[in-house]
Amino acid sequence: MSRRDATSRGGNYMEQPEGGWAHNTAALAVGKGVYYSFPVRYIGSIQVIESLRTLDMDQKTQVCWEAISRCCDHAQLRKVTKRKVPKHVKKFLADAPYIKEMDLKINMSVEGIATSSLDENEVISNDVITKISFAAGGEKGEYDFVTYVAKDKRENRYCHVFDCGILSDDVLSTIGQIFNILTKDENTIQTLKKQKEEIATAPPGGAPQLDNPLYHAMANDQGGYLDVRPDDDGGVNAPRADMAAVNESYDDVDGAGGDQLYDTATPEQGQQFAEFLNHNVQSQPLYGEVGDDGQLYGDGAEPGWGYLDVKPDEDLYGGLADVFVEGDQ
């Protein structure tokens, strides 16, 4: 799966594109088990031996590029080629990655990044947002790959590498949008909190009605309110939502904090809300429609809003490294 029309990324994925964000900001900030999901292929993970805090953005990105390259090499996804690795990169990565190719869904919200099975939507892993520090996309022949850096339960850091195919820009920009939300000013944060609270007041046992304040409080990125009542043609009166991203809310103190407060909706509420978002507050892909030459991973799987019944018990899932890397040792 390859994007032949792009080989190099540019710009800051935490900055809003000229055409607007790909997703409605308030929807992405709801949390409560509501995620935006992409079908991807997990390739593997490689340990980051030292904290990246001493590196600048470009150097962190170079570490991520090398992590992607080593995972591709060991997974034999292409012919191994010699490359010159900067000295400052070598000391940050373990020699060999852990490889386990697996098609799955990567699910993202302000609560973190979770993976789930394609068919049953069962939670596989859950990296809470305070454990995720950085994300970057590949370059040139590895453009389709995206990696994020997260701590496991033992405070070890790993680069987790995914083949996202034509969705690589969309996956990376979604992570960047989430990091952007977490750096908003206090007024914006309070507004988002209010919108999140309103989902808890939704009528039990059924989807909230269209006049529920939750839907009319969906703030758009121009500072107004998003009218989510359907157009005559069945659409929605919404503005078009159009290198690397760093999470400023990341907890980089070894052994400190990192607890995630989960306030989940009931499965019925969460699933109904995700369904509403898919029908009325649709996201805009950066790449465009998937054509015959750009199929997605998973049989019939597509990007979209979904719900995961994620529990606050860290031991129940663990992060991606806890499940795959540590779990197989």
Image (cartoon, helix red, strand yellow):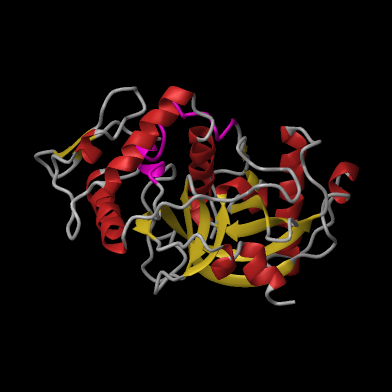
Magenta span: 11-30
The percent coordinates of residue 140 (x first, y second) are 66, 47
Which residue is drawn at the image coordinates 31% and 60% (left, top)? 266
Q: Quadrant of residue 179?
A: top right
Instruction: Establish if 55 lies above or below 299.
Output: above
Left-right relation of 55 to 115:
right
Q: Does 203 appear in magenta?
A: no
Residue 153 visible to an observer of this rendering: yes
- Please name the predominant secondary structure of the magenta segment in the image: loop
Question: Which residue is nearer to you in this view: 133 or 314?
Answer: 314
Q: Kindly give the residue lying farthest to the left in the view shown.
A: 232
The percent coordinates of residue 95 (x first, y second) are 85, 61
Question: Which residue is nearer to you in this view: 227 or 211?
Answer: 211
The percent coordinates of residue 56 (x first, y second) are 76, 32
Q: Does 28 appear in magenta?
A: yes
Instruction: Establish if 112 lies above or below 187.
Output: below
Left-right relation of 260 to 79:
left
Residue 241 visible to an observer of this rendering: no
Q: Quadrant of the C terminus?
A: bottom right
Left-right relation of 51 to 43:
right
Q: Kindly give the residue lying farthest to the bottom in the view shown.
A: 328
Question: Which residue is nearer to you in this view: 72 or 319?
Answer: 319
Q: Quadrant of residue 100?
A: bottom right
Which residue is drawn at the image coordinates 70% and 69% (left, top)? 325
